[in-house]
Image (cartoon, rainbow, N blue to C red):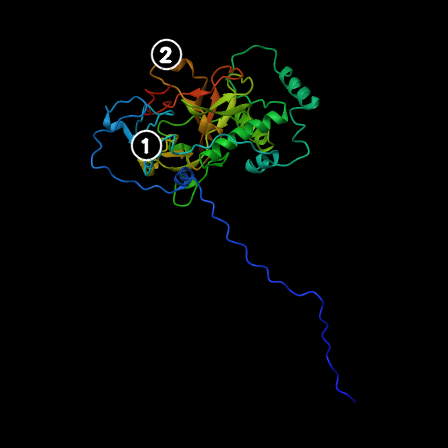
Amino acid sequence: MAPARKFIRFSGSSRRTVPPSPPQPRKYKAIGEVLAKAKYAVVERESYSDVICEQCRSGDRAEELLLCDKCDKGFHMNCLRPIVVKLPMGSWLCPKCCEHRRVRKFSQKKIIDFFRIQKSSRVDEICGSPQAQDTRKRRKRSGPLVMQKKRRRLLPFTPVEDPAQRLKEMGSLASALIALNMEFSDDLTYLPGWAPRSANQAKLEKGGMQVLPKEDIETLEHCRAMSKRGECPPLLVVFDSCEGFTVEADGPIKDMTFIAEYTGDVDYLTNREKDDCDSMMTLLLANDSSRSLVICPDKRGNIARFVNGINNHTTDGKKKQNCKCVRYNVNGECRVFLVATRDIAKGERLYYDYNGYEHEYPTHHFV
């Protein structure tokens, strides 16, 4: 038997070698684009005697001049908008170099995830259904007819009825928080190595602290439940070239209405005496200063962080005040609430006095 043979079939066409294409010329970015994204280095001058403020064109008050660590230009702390109250710690960039992020829009899903809103089929129906409105009307009419002097109770805020407008309100807050690299938090936060929750004892307050009545605690819990459902207070966070981020009413707010709780990270005052955060809030003023506490909303916080203060050294500044910051003893712990002190119209900005207790906050240069 003949051995098996392997036959190979050749096609009629022959393979052609394609010459390699010439390399494409590299596209280079414009020098302006490269410099805008390049890391900068701080180069010390031999003399800073010729530095002037880029706003007022004056070199006076050299102790108040800030030098941008990128462009090396000078700015008076009081000439900047918003005003810089304390000397910044670490590097500082001027408004043109910091590339401030503008307000961005958020989808409904991102807003719900950002604020950790409890998903429910009734979210869009609340405050818009006739049954909810009738319930509120019945509650208003069910009060006593006999006129008598009573202690003024806190009122719950009334969310806007339009779900799309509520998303716009929450989107404005989310944009402001992200612009400041902050996380949303509606509660006081106790971090490891900082003041523990056990240090927050209202009984340590110098001179005592007013106790929040049971009826007002119910109002507080009602407002917190509404916020978790996505029914936020009627407030918008807007950006002003002079005041920075600020808050304005997106609907009418009645006198004595609960607006928000001041939240953030809790720490001992002694640990934050040299902190450059300009939004720290007193939580506890103890007889022993080493046990005093402050709220630091530089990493976590809510809309209370963006309510601006008044210039309490001028008559016009005091007239702008329409809410106040009040500290209460709630179940033995110190809490800080923002409450309306008069009726606030839609479109009106919210202001309160930063010097409600210590009278140490510098407000001379506030707008």
Q: Is residue 34 visible?
A: yes
**Residue type pointed to by label 2:** Thr
Mark 1 crowdedness (10 Å alpha carbons): few <14, some 14-19, many ≥20:
few
Q: Residue furthest right?
A: 1
Q: Which mark is residue 261?
A: none
Label annotation for residue 287: 1
Where, by quadrant of the figure, is residue 40 drawn? Answer: top left
| 340 relative to 15, above or below | above
- The residue at the point 35 percent across, 32 percent down is 286
Q: Quadrant of the N terminus?
A: bottom right
Q: Residue at x 20, y 30 (%)?
A: 49
> In this orientation, does residue 331 appear?
no
Task: Name which residue type carries label 1.
Answer: Asn
Residue at the (50%, 53%) spot, across then down: 23
User: In the figure, residue 134 lies in which quadrant?
Assistant: top right
Image disc number at residue 315: 2
Quarter of the rendering occupied by the C terminus: top left
Count of numbered marks: 2
Mark 1 → mark 2, Cα distance in angstroms: 33 Å
